[in-house]
Amino acid sequence: MLSRWYFYNFLFFLFSITVSDSLATETNELELIRKSFYSAVEDEKETEVLFSQLKVILDKQKNNAAPIIIAYYGATETLLGKHALNPYKKWNKLKSGLEKIAAAIEQSPKDLEIRFLRFSILHHLPSFLGFSDERNEDKGVIYNLLLQKNYSALEFKIQKGIIEFMIESERLSKSQNARLRKLLDE
C-alpha cells in the first residue's frame, strides 16, 4: 500500500515538472501519459491520479497545450464517468470529456491517436446516446490514416494496436478489415 503511494507521488512529481520545449521531454511525457491512461481504464484510483496530473500540465501550458494532451485529459474525464456510480455524474463526465476531445480534434483533425481515443470510447457506448455520427466519422478517418502508413507521428507498434482494435471492433466492412490485415503482414 505504501509503495503504491510512493508510485503515485513519483508520477505526480514527473507530471509536475515544468514541461520543456524539447521533443525528447514531450515524447517521454506522452509515453508516460499513454501508459497511465491504459492502466486507468480499469482502475478508478489511477484514473483520478492521471486526471489530476493532466490538469496540472494543462494549467501550466495554458493556451499552448498540445491537442494530444487535451485529448487525453478529455478521455481521462470520460473514465471518471465510467467509474462513477451516479448516472448523472456518469453522463456529465462523459459529455464534458467528449467535448474536450472534440476540441482537440478541431485543432488537429487528422491526428490518428486523438481520433482513436474518441473512437475507442464511442465504440463502447450504446447508439441511443447519440454519438453514432462522431463514431462513424472517426472510423473513416482512422481507416484512411492507417492506410497512409505514416509512422513519423505515431510509431508502427501503436498503429498496430489500433489496427487490431479496429478489426476486433467489427465496425469496418470485410474488405476494410482485409486491407488492414495486410498492413499487419507487411
Image (cartoon, helix red, strand yellow):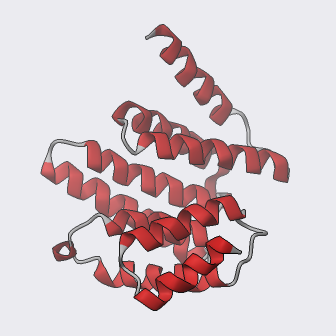
In the picture, measured across the screen, residue 44 lies left or right of residue 49, that is left
Residue 66 on image: x %, y %: 65, 60
Residue at 48% across / 8% down in the picture?
Answer: 2
Q: Across the whole image, how many numbered discs are drawn on residues?
A: 0
Residue that lies at the very extreme toward the bottom in this rendered image: 175
Q: Compared with residue 62, is residue 46 higher up or lower down, i.e. above or below?
A: above
Quadrant of the frame with the C terminus = bottom right
Q: Compared with residue 166, is residue 133 higher up or lower down, i.e. above or below?
A: below
Residue at 73% across / 38% down in the picture?
Answer: 18
Front residue of this view, candidates 72 and 155: 155
Residue 169 on image: x %, y %: 38, 70
In the picture, measured across the screen, residue 126 lies left or right of residue 56, that is left
Q: Compared with residue 121, is residue 4 higher up or lower down, i.e. above or below?
A: above
Front residue of this view, candidates 178 and 130: 178
Residue 127 on image: x %, y %: 21, 76
Residue 78 on image: x %, y %: 35, 54
Residue at 28% across / 49% down in the picture?
Answer: 82
Front residue of this view, candidates 88 and 145: 145
